[in-house]
């Protein structure tokens, strides 16, 4: 017997799904079985800043054996939790959250629902969730013209395996393959064929390493990648093709060899490490013996003090780094390890960027649920309306992989519920949906590769997919892509995933794009899926989960503005499964029509648009 009903991701129970705007009244409805018959029902709302309130709910009417209890609520911005308390009942008096997000009764230790409240300060970029985003590590994407290695860096033959062994006990990351901005420019037509409308570039500023997360000079493009003028040319040509460029902002730390720190004396006698009077000295925390604070104890990455006025001015002033590269043509920033950047700096970064270009995008690297993130003991406020436009959607990545690898629908359902319930709509529709990045195992290897993730790099360097693993991986990857491209948010492709690249974690996930050796059938599938992203329903449409059982997952995307309605179903169950339809639907990839019901075969999928008869 069902005793209580409440699901905050359904408008019937919570009039605004997800996070709610500050001072905007919204309704909450909980349904209680008439056999319980409470005398009073209260909605208790509290946060970790001292707010604690109970709102008495009023009884609306009884329908189909359930009493409706309703509260009208409005709150100031912040993060809250809530549950329901009943009076006049003999047994459990609390209603809280069960596994999966719905309601259940509690005697004590009630599990609350999260409630996020925001006050939006900046416009969300209108272009961000259109089309496809494509992530590029410049050195490994495409090489055009003559590339001259600087210092003691090693230029290697395109397609060789990246170096993975330490040199003299150090990981130097000094092997390069010649990829450059000219190569990105040359491949813009190819990217456009994938319906790419945003390019996210891993760091491209002057740095020693091939990954460039050890910045030496934020004001200039690394000479092995090109020049500042070539970057401006890339942005100009991309803009003419309807493509925006997002840069990687590494503002938490610099390279120890940088002109700011200059530990090895590469930039002369100055620098924070060698000169106590250096203008950069105050940027860093120094201890006895000239020891200094590093990021995750990497001595090559001294950490910047976020609250230092000089550092804030350098990055966020009117002529600072953040607005400078927007002036040069970039359309936004992906902020590296944003959870390590204190709010005092993050607020200024966002303010400087939005002042220069109100339509620029600010995307944060967060690996967890970003709506309730706590870091260094501080509750972060990414989604309160004055910071991020989006985050990298690692929770959904993990859930999609768990579902496609093992049929784990529970993990996918719970992740989707958390996003729908916890995130503001403007964040949800602009999430950066990934299957892999430079920090993760290649998606093809993740799906079917041998479980050698805890082995040595020597083992990983020699482990390849067998032919049967590869073919199975392609089949499963297509299921992942279907979910990635049709969920809320926008799909982001790590360069080469569409070509069938494989590889374990760094550096093996960072190989060279296999030009001329691509899996063309897989690439064609990505082209087809990219075309679907022209439909408004996938950019801004509503999301409703329809089925989640036994490895079968189905949902509906619908748009009141365009009138589009699409049902997506993916079957990782052991048998065929079906989803009910409200009429005639046409498969957007095959053209096949379905009436009232669609049966999906094992390891199959459908993407069905409602057929409108004129």
Image (tube, helix red, strand yellow):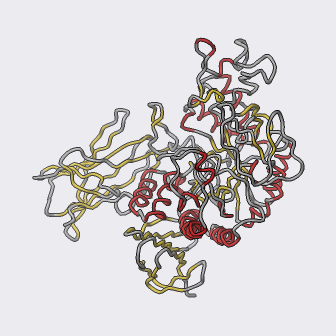
Total numbered labels: 0
Q: Quadrant of the C terminus?
A: bottom right
Q: Is residue 509 visible?
A: yes
- Residue name at image x 58 percent, y 12 percent: 288
Q: Is residue 441 above or below residue 481?
A: above
Depicted 524 relative to depicted 40: above or below? below
Residue 532 lies, in percent from the top left, at 63, 70
In percent of width and height, residue 486 lies at: 55, 66
Q: Is residue 141 left or right of residue 459?
A: right
Task: List the single residue furthest toward the right.
Answer: 146
Q: Is residue 522 left or right of residue 103?
A: right
Q: Viewed as shown, does residue 168 lie left or right of 582? A: right
Residue ID at (48%, 34%): 375
Q: Quadrant of residue 108?
A: top left
**Residue 291 percent location from the top left of the image:** 61, 17
Q: Is residue 561 visible from the viewing direction of this image?
A: no
**In the rendered image, the vertical position of residue 84 relative to residue 288, given as above or below:** below
Residue 547 x, y percent position in the rendering: 40, 70
Residue at the outermost left position: 90
Quadrant placement of the N terminus: bottom left
């Amino acid at each position: 017997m069902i005793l209580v009903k409440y699901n905050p991701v359904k408008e019937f129970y919570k009039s605004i799904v997800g996070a709610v705007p500050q001072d905007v009244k919204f309704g909450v409805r909980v349904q209680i079985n008439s056999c319980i018959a409470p005398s009073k029902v209260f909605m208790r709302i509290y946060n970790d800043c001292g707010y604690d309130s109970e709102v008495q709910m009023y009884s609306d009417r009884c329908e189909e054996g359930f009493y409706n209890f309703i509260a009208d609520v409005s709150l100031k911005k912040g993060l809250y939790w809530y549950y329901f308390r009943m009076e006049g009942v003999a047994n459990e008096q609390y209603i809280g959250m069960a596994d999966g997000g719905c309601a259940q009764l509690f005697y004590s230790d009630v599990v609350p629902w999260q409630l996020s409240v925001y006050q939006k300060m900046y416009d969300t970029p209108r272009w961000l969730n259109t089309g496809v985003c494509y992530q590029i590590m410049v050195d490994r994407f495409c090489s055009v013209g003559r590339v001259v290695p600087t210092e003691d860096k090693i230029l290697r033959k395109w397609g060789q395996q990246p170096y993975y062994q330490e040199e003299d006990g150090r990981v130097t990351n000094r092997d390069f393959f010649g990829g450059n901005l000219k190569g990105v420019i040359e491949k813009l037509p190819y990217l456009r064929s994938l319906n790419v409308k945003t390019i996210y570039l891993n760091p491209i500023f002057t740095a020693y390493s091939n990954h460039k997360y050890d910045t030496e000079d934020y004001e200039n493009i690394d000479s092995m990648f090109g020049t500042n003028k070539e970057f401006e040319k890339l942005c100009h040509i991309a803009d003419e093709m309807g493509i925006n460029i997002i840069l990687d902002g590494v503002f938490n730390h610099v390279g120890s060899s940088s002109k700011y720190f200059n530990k090895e004396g590469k930039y002369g006698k100055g620098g924070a490490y060698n000169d106590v009077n250096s203008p950069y000295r105050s940027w860093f925390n120094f201890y006895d013996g000239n020891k200094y604070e590093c990021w995750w104890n990497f001595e090559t990455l001294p950490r910047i003090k976020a609250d230092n006025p000089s550092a804030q001015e350098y990055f966020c002033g009117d002529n600072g780094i953040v607005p400078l590269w927007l002036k040069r043509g970039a359309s936004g920033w992906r902020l590296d390890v944003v959870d390590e950047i204190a709010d005092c700096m993050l607020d200024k970064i966002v303010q400087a960027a939005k002042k220069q270009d109100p339509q620029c995008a600010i995307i944060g690297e967060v690996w967890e649920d970003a709506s309730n993130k706590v870091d260094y003991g501080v509750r972060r406020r990414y989604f309160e309306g004055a910071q991020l436009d989006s985050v990298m959607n690692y929770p959904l990545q993990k859930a999609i992989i768990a579902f496609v690898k093992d049929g784990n629908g529970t993990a996918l359902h719970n992740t989707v519920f958390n996003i729908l319930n916890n995130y503001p709509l403007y964040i949800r529709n602009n999430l950066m949906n990934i299957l892999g990045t430079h920090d993760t195992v290649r998606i093809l290897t993740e799906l079917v590769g041998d479980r050698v993730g805890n082995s040595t790099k020597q083992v990983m360097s020699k482990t390849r997919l067998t032919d049967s693993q590869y073919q199975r991986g392609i089949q499963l990857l297509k299921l992942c892509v279907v979910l990635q491209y049709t969920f809320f948010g926008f799909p982001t492709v790590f360069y080469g995933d569409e070509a069938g690249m494989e590889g374990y974690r760094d550096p093996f996930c960072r190989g060279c794009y296999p030009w001329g050796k691509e899996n063309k059938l897989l690439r064609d599938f990505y082209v087809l899926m990219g075309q679907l992203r022209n439909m408004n329903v996938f950019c801004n449409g509503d999301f409703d989960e329809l089925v989640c059982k036994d490895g079968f997952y189905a949902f509906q995307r619908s748009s009141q503005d365009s009138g589009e309605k699409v049902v997506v179903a993916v079957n990782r169950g052991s048998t065929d499964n079906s989803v009910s339809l409200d009429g005639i639907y046409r498969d957007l990839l095959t053209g096949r029509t379905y009436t009232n019901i669609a049966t999906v075969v094992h390891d199959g999928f459908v993407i069905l648009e409602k057929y409108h008869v004129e």
